[in-house]
Image (spheres, rainbow, N blue to C red):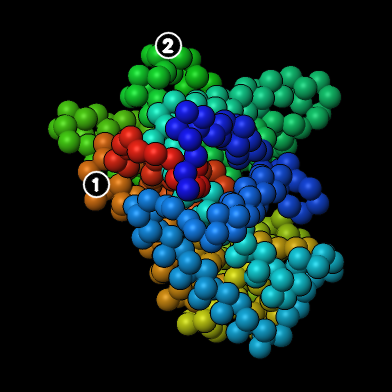
Amino acid sequence: MAYSLRRPPNHRIFLTAICVLASAPVLKLLDVQILEIVLLANAAGLFLLFIFRGFRLTLNRIWLPPTICYVFFFFITLLLAFASLRFRFYPPPAATSLLKQPLMISIVRIIELSLGAIGMIYIANILRNNAADRIYALKVYYWTGFASACFAILSIPLYFAAGIGLGVYFPNLRARGFFNEGGPYGLYLISIIVIGIFLYRLGKLSKTQLFFSIGILVPVFFMAQAKAAILACFALFLLNVFVVGSLRLKVGLVLAASVFAAVVLVFSDFKQNFMGYVQGYMLVQEIGVNVDESAYGGFGGRLAGAILVPRMILAHPLTGIGIGNYPLVFNDPSYLEGLPPTTKWESQSIGIIGYIAELGVPLFVALLLVLCVPAVMIYRRKAPPIVFILAVVQPMVHIFGVQLNFYYPWICSGFALSFIEAQSRPPTILE
């Protein structure tokens, strides 16, 4: 059954909610992001609709390949999560929540990833043949990101006057917008800038609007001091060189990438910060078990991830330790090898590379392929380069450090997929 063409459903409330909440992952109810609640409610609504329609589902076959890939990946991940119960866990004192217990944390992570995949396909499906809503969603996403950058700038006077860190924080006015820290925020701003260029290419953003907004976004991007974001931005520059057809554009992009790299090296502390991680890693390797918990600002975060994740991979290269289990095995003496345990709930903090330890090498390779499915679909259908670049945002930001339970990359992939072979047809049961 299909809805009447005379009264198409209004998706703008849902689209507004996800675009706004994607800019503020710090908004949570206990340990659950508000955006996750919205996506979960939407998925539950779709499931109920599926039941009420007599277990019939009309979905364009174009979404069948990614759906099969995600279902297969989640099924194998769940099996390995059950298999991980054979390990001995060392939960820190901070692991008081039921959702942070063995197996439960794995199920939670799988549900989070499922919400991202379902949301991506749903967004692509409802926008594919609704040009007005496509542009509306892109604009809401873009201007929300712009508002977060303005919030960061407006937070500076308050920081100096009262020492209150809102959109910026100690010690160097590092921008974070509506995020918890500058690293993830810098990567989020890349998606905002790409969508701004996308809107301009579609003729939905004037040159004045683009230059004005980019004039705010770019300085805030550098204020975020996100080393991974700078590397991801440089990688996108180079990727564009291969996908654009014009020699003039290729030369322009190479020059732009060169200027970008020069500006970063000359006017930022990127090199010093990057070397700080290298020196911290070498320090721990050198003094070994003599390191104390105050080393390098506390033995945890990226430094601990860079040391412990390889040990976990070597111990369980095929099956991994189970998705989400890194903080539960952090204190395992066989991994620490004399290094100090933690009392905190630790994240491996090295992005998608850390999932090798949790998933094992074979399933991690499958994860990389799954994340690239939208970009591959778009590339094979010879969509415009800007659509392909928008789809590449997701694997790119994940590779450079964004955790899979950040939903803005999934949303960007949904936007990109909605431009695949859009054509007029009756809305389906999902619409």
Q: Which mark is residue 302?
A: none
Which residue does the image show at 50% across and 32% down from the upper left? 8
User: Does the rendering let one see residue 276?
Assistant: no
Q: Which residue is mark 2?
A: 208
- The residue located at (38%, 14%) in the rendering is 207
Query: Contact (CB < 8 A) between labels 1 and 2?
Result: no
Identify the element where label 2 is drawn: helix
* Residue 262 in the image, given as x and y percentages of width and height: 38, 34
Which residue is at a point 47% across and 48% down the rendered structure image?
Answer: 1
Residue 197, percent from left and from top: 39, 27
Which SS class for mark 1?
loop
Instruction: Name which quarter of the figure residue 143 lies in.
Output: top right
Out of 109 and 340, give the one closest to the viewer: 109
User: In the visual, does 329 lie left or right of 416?
Assistant: right
Residue reaching furthest to the top: 208
The foreground one among 374 and 269 is 374
Q: Residues within 10 Å of mark 1 (few under 14, many from 20)?
A: few
On the question of residue 430 being in view, the answer is yes
Of the numbered discs in the image, which one, if any, rests on residue 381? 1
Q: Position of residue 261 (x, y in %)?
A: 38, 37
Amino acid type at image mark 1:
Arg
- Above/below status of 97 relative to 275: below
Relative height, residue 109 to residue 397 (above, below): below
> Which kind of residue does numbered mark 2 sit on?
Thr
Q: Is residue 300 above or below residue 191?
A: below
Residue, x 45% and y 32% (percent of image)? Answer: 5
